[in-house]
């Protein structure tokens, strides 16, 4: 079974196209979070674009619900990130399990 590290290593364009970390020796936590989320999204798209599209749709609904209940901006952003990445574990599943036909 592939792990996340090997999936990242197998994606040569992934690191080249991912946003650069801030040029500070101590980048801010939000900058690191955004970089991580974007990189994971690229890996998801590389393995299964529908997986990423599903995450983005889910994130849109989560954002709208969060706004409706009055979450502050910082919490909305965390809800959005969580929704986009909620299926990230599927990256480690073998294709024969991920694409299993449902009876």
Image (tube, rainbow, N blue to C red):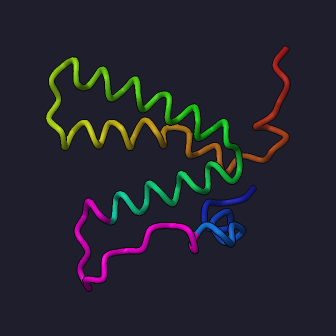
Q: Position of residue 9 (x, y in %)?
A: 66, 72
Q: Residue at x 68, y 53 (%)?
A: 46
Image quarter hosting the C terminus: top right
Q: In this view, does 14 lie to the left or right of 26?
A: right
Residue 36, placed above or below residue 93: below
| Quadrant housing residue 29 | bottom left
Q: In this view, does 74 lie to the left or right of 22?
A: left
Outermost residue to the bottom: 25
Residue 16 counted in the magenta span: yes
Residue 22 counted in the magenta span: yes
Q: Which residue is drawn at 33% across and 65% down?
A: 32
Q: Position of residue 62 (x, y in %)?
A: 36, 26
| Quadrant housing residue 5 | bottom right
Total marks drawn?
0
Residue 20, placed above or below residue 102: below
Q: Residue at x 65, y 69 (%)?
A: 13
Q: Where is residue 59 in the image (x, y as percent from the top left)?
A: 42, 32
Q: Is the magenta stretch mostly helix, strand or loop?
A: loop
**Residue nearest the observer in this picture, 76 or 88:** 76
Q: Give the range drawn in magenta.
A: 15-31
Q: In this view, does 17 lie to the left or right of 71?
A: right
Q: Position of residue 71 (x, y in %)?
A: 17, 29
**Residue nearest the observer in this picture, 85 or 22:** 22
| Quadrant housing residue 27 | bottom left
Q: Residue at x 81, y 44 (%)?
A: 95
Image quarter hosting the N terminus: bottom right
Residue 46, placed above or below residue 90: below
Outermost residue to the top: 103
């Amino acid at each position: 079974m592939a792990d996340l590290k090997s999936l990242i290593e197998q994606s040569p364009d992934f690191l080249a196209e991912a946003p650069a970390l801030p040029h500070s020796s101590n980048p801010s936590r939000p900058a690191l979070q955004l970089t991580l989320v974007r990189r994971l999204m690229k890996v998801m798209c590389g393995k299964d674009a529908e997986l990423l599209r599903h995450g983005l749709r889910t994130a849109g609904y989560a954002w709208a619900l969060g706004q409706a209940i009055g979450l502050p901006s910082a919490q909305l952003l965390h809800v959005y990130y969580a929704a986009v990445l909620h299926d990230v574990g599927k990256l480690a599943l073998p294709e024969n399990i991920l694409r299993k036909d449902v009876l």
